Amino acid sequence: MANSLICLLLSACSLNCIAADWDLLDQDPGEGEVYLRSYSGILQDPRGDGRADPFDTWLINTGYQYNIMDDVTLFMEGGPAGSTDTRKAGFNLASGLRYQLSPQLHVGSQLSQRELGSATTQLELNSRLQLPYLALTANYGISPLTAEQSLSIGMGFHF
C-alpha cells in the first residue's frame, strides 16, 4: 500500500513537471522555500477495543512550500516517523494548504500518509504557534476509509 502511494505521488509530480510552465523556474526566490521541521508529541491512537492508547511520536520532515496567494501556502513534506514503542517506526508523507493568520499563528489542512507499524491515511486539520526557538502544534485527523480519529499535541522546531 505504501509503495503504491509513493509511486502514485511521484508519478503525479512527474506529470505535473512535464505540463508545467517553465517560467515558474524563473520565479522570485521569496515565492517558494525548502524547510525542515521536527515534531514530537502525544498521539491519541484508537485501538480496536474502543479505548485510546496514547504514545509519544516524532517526525522529522523536509518539505517545500509555495505561496499561492497572500498568506496561503501550498506544501508537500515527508520524512521518517517513529515512536517510543520500538516496534513502531516508519515514514510520514503529507501535502496540503496552510493559512497564516498572523506571523506566529498558522492553521491548515492536509492529506497525510503515516506508516507506524501499519499504514494510515488521514485528512487532518492542524495549527502551529511559532515561538522564537520553538513551535507548538496540534493536529486532528480522521481517516476517510475507516473513520478512525486521532489527536496529537506537541512541540518541535521549524526552519
Image (tube, rainbow, N blue to C red):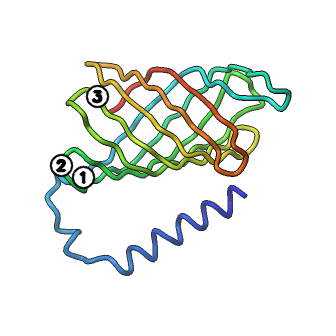
Residue position for label 2: 70
Picture quadrant of residue 101 = top left
Residue type (three-letter) at the residue carrying disc 1: Asn
Neighbours of disc 2 within 10 Å: few (<14), some (14-19), many (20+): few
Taking the spot 16% from the left edge, 50% from the top edge, the residue there is: 30
Disc on the earlier residue, 2 or 3: 2
Residue type (three-letter) at the residue carrying disc 3: Leu
In the picture, measured across the screen, residue 44 lies left or right of residue 103, that is right
Residue position for label 3: 105
Disc on the earlier residue, 3 or 1: 1
Camera-nearest label, 2 or 1: 2
In the picture, measured across the screen, residue 80 lies left or right of residue 155, that is right
Q: Residue furthest left?
A: 28
Please state the horizontal and vertical placement of residue 141, each as a whole percent of the image. Answer: 57, 37
Which quadrant holds the N terminus? bottom right
Number of numbered callouts drawn: 3
**Mark identifier at residue 67:** 1
Taking the spot 39% from the left edge, 40% from the top edge, the residue there is: 108
Please state the horizontal and vertical placement of residue 87, each as a whole percent of the image. Answer: 78, 31
Instruction: For mark 2, give the secondary structure.
Output: loop
Nearer to the camera, 60 or 131: 131
Q: Residue furthest right?
A: 49
Which quadrant holds the C terminus? top left
Nearer to the camera, 119 or 38: 119
Neighbours of disc 1 within 10 Å: few (<14), some (14-19), many (20+): some
Rounded to the nearest angstrom, the CA distance separating label 2 from label 1 is 7 Å
